[in-house]
Amino acid sequence: MNQNLPFILNPDEKLIIDSSLAGYTGMKIENMGFFGMGITGSGLGGGLTTSTQHKTEGNILDSRRVHIYLTNKRFIAAIAKQNFLGTEEHSVGTVHSDIALQSIVGIMAQPYMLLGTKVGEAIELSVKAPSGDVDNITISFVTRHRALRTDERDNWIRLIREQIEINRKVIQKPSDSEDPVNIVKMRYAKGEITAEQYNEMLEILNKK
């Protein structure tokens, strides 16, 4: 796993997986927002990443060769220099697209086709913008050493789905003030219920 990252990791963010020799087709999505610290090409660094997304104008069919990264918060594609055949990656440059996982509303496996011929595997990501618009982005895994990268593609889909589900559970987790047991304790502390009612309510809640 490549730890020399071209982007900033936030304090609660970690790298899950990365892959070379990928393609990115679709709208470029950028993030700008909260402060983060992480490892950059020149060492430890800090900077702004984002909690909101906006699209940059461009051809929806615009395609880039990229190195892709998955963290527990984002899917990131960075511009990569590859040889003409796309069989070797020489270096990784700046971030091309930065997608918050909570904005991904669909993920699907596809064959990667060129002039009617299957030349690799692909993932189609459906990304929802704050405006409600949904854009489809294709991440391609071109054949490497004449072998299809089906297992690699499927592993990416599994990991993206896992991280999306983990993020969803974190977002939906009730705060302490919403926890039923804490509410009962607060009511008892304020004298709104008797000790008998308090114990009865706790017994009912603990059975759930």
Image (spheres, grey):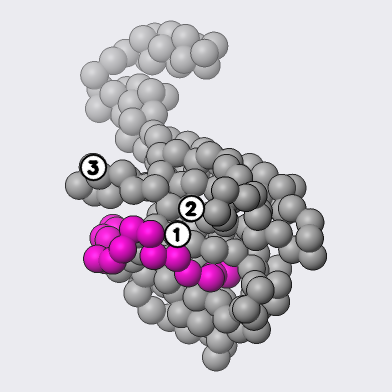
Q: For the residue marked with disc 3, what is the amino acid? A: Gly
Q: Is residue 25 left or right of residue 139?
A: left
Quadrant in which the N terminus appears: bottom right
Up/down of 81 relative to 208, above or below: below
- Sequence-first tag of 1 and 2: 1
Q: Which residue is mark 3?
A: 132
Residue 61 part of the magenta-drawn span: yes
Q: Is residue 170 left or right of residue 186?
A: right
Magenta-highlighted residues: 50-68
Q: Is residue 118 visible?
A: yes
Disc 3 crowd, CA 10 A, few/some/many (<14, 14-19, 20+): few
User: What SS does tag 1 mark?
Assistant: strand
Q: For the residue marked with disc 1, what is the amino acid? A: Thr
Nearest-to-viewer mark from 3 and 1: 1
Q: For the residue marked with disc 2, what is the amino acid? A: Thr
Residue 25, which numbered label? 1
Q: Which residue is mark 2?
A: 138
Q: Residue at x 50, y 75 (%)?
A: 79
Q: Is residue 146 left or right of residue 57?
A: right
Q: Position of residue 104 (x, y in %)?
A: 42, 45
User: What SS does tag 2 mark?
Assistant: strand
Q: Is residue 197 left or right of residue 129?
A: right
Q: Tell me if label 1 and label 2 are in contact, CB under 8 Å.
A: yes
Residue nearer the viewer, 76 or 34: 76
Q: Residue at x 65, y 55 (%)?
A: 119
Q: Position of residue 22 (x, y in %)?
A: 59, 64
